Image (cartoon, rainbow, N blue to C red):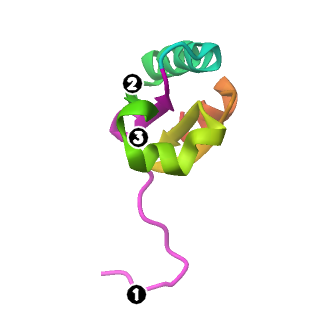
Amino acid sequence: MAPFSPFSRSPRKSPADRMVTLVGKPGCHLCDDAQAVIEKVCAETGASWEKKDITEDPELHRKYWEQIPVILVDGAQHDFWRVDPKRLRTALGA
C-alpha cells in the first residue's frame, strides 16, 4: 500500500460518469442555444445530461434567475449565458 500523500489525486471520472445539467426556462433562446451545444458535446463524449426548469423550482430560481441558462457539471456551476463546447469537453475530461 502506498504511503498517504496530501497531494494525491483521486482518479478522474470518465465523461460517461459525468452529469451535465441545463438550468433554464421555456421560451429562452439562450437556453435553446445552450441545449444544442450540450446535446452535441454529451453525444460526443458519452456524458449524460438533464434539463431543469427554473420556473418549477424555487431554490434554482433563487440561485440562478439572473444567470440563465446555467450549466452545471456534476452539480457544480460550470458556466452561464453561453456554453463554450471546448470548455465543456475539457470539464468532462474528454
- Mark 1 Cα within 10 Å, few/some/many (few <14, many 20+)? few
User: Which x, y percent locates residue 83?
Assistant: 66, 27
Q: Is residue 86 left or right of residue 77?
A: right
Q: Is the magenta region chiefly helix, strand or loop?
A: loop
Work out how far the residue at label 1 is from the one at label 3, CA to CA, in angstroms: 26 Å
In this figure, which residue is indicated by the disc labeled 2? 46
Residue 22: x and y, percent?
A: 48, 30
**Position in image of residue 89 (x %, y %):** 58, 31
| Residue drawn at 56 percent across, 44 percent down | 64
**Residue sitting at x 55%, y 12%:** 36
Which amino acid type is marked by label 2?
Answer: Gly
Closer to the eye: label 1 or 3: 3
Is residue 27 toward the left or the right of residue 50 in the image? right
**Magenta stretch in the rendered image:** 1-25
Q: Are marks 2 and 3 in contact (CB under 8 Å)?
A: yes
Q: Identify residue type, mark 1.
A: Pro
Is 6 one of the magenta-colored residues?
A: yes
Three-letter residue code for mark 3:
Ser
Identify residue for label 3. 14
Q: Where does label 1 land, which residue?
A: 3
Asked which secondary structure carries label 1, the reply is loop
Q: Along the line of sight, which residue is nearer the eye, 32 or 14?
A: 32
